[in-house]
Image (cartoon, rainbow, N blue to C red):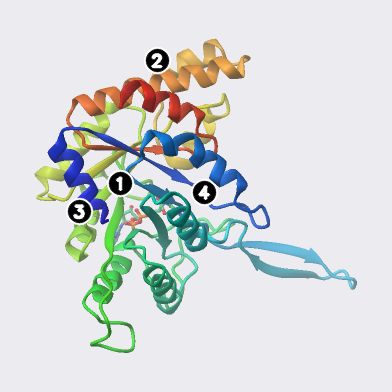
Amino acid sequence: MKITDIIGRAAASGKPRFTFELLPPLKGEGTARVFEAIDTLAPLGPAYINVTFHREDTRYTERADGLLERHTVRHRPGTVGISAAIARRYGIETVPHVICGGQSLYDIEDALIDIDLLGMRNVLALRGDARRGENRFEPHPQGHAHADGLVAQIADMNRGKYIDSEGAQPTDFCVGVAGYPEKHAESPNIEADIEALKRKVDAGADYIVTQMSFDNARILDFIARVRAAGITVPVVPGIKPLAAPSHLTVLPHTFHVDLPPDLVHEVERCRHNPAAVREAGTEWAAHQAAGLKKAGLPVIHFYSMGRTDNIARIVKRVF
Ligand code: FAD
């Protein structure tokens, strides 16, 4: 089922649903850890599951002659494969992420063909970040500079237009894109960022998933701005239960989001007790989820990055 239909049904029934995001396994790790994370949440009825895509990295190895050899490696390949495996094993709608970074239009088209042939109808279209060691995003020479180009490519495939041929069998993808309640790091201001978001929707995006925010007021203000800009597609807010003292610096650094002073204070107060920090983060996210539910949002998305026991506790309490 398309994600927009799932959101529409949740809205019509007045029964909000939850979704969550997982990472594909590290290369060579197998499926066990991913399935374990899903086993915790599957009985609670997730609306769908997102699976992230991880771009290539550079590794240098020293040769016998002392020269360094450069390798391009991917530490977490397998997004499409694990997405199909999850859908088959659990019968839950799965959304593989597709990114522009490091990929030509042909690479992307091939990945979308795999997703289509495997029977998946949903993708999240993203630009991706700069490659590690680069300080800005450099598009692939035959790739997209921004996610709107990727959305347009998928919209073309949905009309039967592939890169080198027209009149092919159309795909039927429902396309999500990213939105940023606290503004994307590279945007000069929130207004410019929402204009960019509108370009993605005009190119064919069907719904928006937000970057994590720890502040419901900012999420709701973002949705109001999105609506004021004439964007009518559904917005799914993303929240992350903070789970370790290191998150106080890692999350703002990695995702360019602010942590509210009250949350920081709570975590600081118990920072030498990991279980208490996890509890404080879970409590904060549960409060956020309850608030967003009360505000009438039909689907709420959780960022997990692996362990999901904290999300299960929130879902049992709030949904
Ligand atoms: P874009 O929409 O291209 O925006 C990037 C920047 O360019 C913004 O500042 C925007 O305002 C601006 N911009 C957009 N379009 C234009 C244009 N046409 N002209 C000029 N400026 C423009 N990353 C991964 O690598 N893998 C993942 O699986 C992944 N999943 C994610 C899931 C979610 C829900 C979110 C919110 C993010 C995810 N990311 C992922 C991170 C994402 O790739 C980064 O945030 C990236 O820096 C921007 O991606 P985007 O799709 O928003 O890019």
**Labelled disc at residue 23:** 4
Q: Which amino acid does label 3 sit on?
A: Glu
Q: How many marks?
A: 4
| Position of 270 relative to 172 (above/below) | above
Residue where numbered disc 3 is placed: 195
Tell me whether circle 1 and circle 2 mark residues in contact (CB < 8 Å).
no
Q: What residue type is labelled 2?
A: Asp
x 28%, y 36%: residue = 17
Residue where numbered disc 1 is placed: 209
- Residue 304 location, x and y as percent? 47, 38
Q: In which quarter of the image is the N terminus?
A: bottom left
Q: In which quarter of the image is ligand 1?
A: bottom left
Q: In which quarter of the image is residue 272?
A: top right
Is 280 left, or right, of 159 in this rendering? right
- Residue 119 location, x and y as percent? 37, 66
Residue where numbered disc 2 is placed: 262
Label 1, label 2: how far apart the Cα atoms are: 25 Å
Q: How crowded is mark 3: few (under 14 residues within 10 Å), some or many (20 or more)?
A: some
Q: In which quarter of the image is residue 72?
A: bottom right
* Comparing labels 1 and 4, the label whose residue is closer to the camera: 4
Q: Is mark 3 on a helix, strand or loop?
A: helix
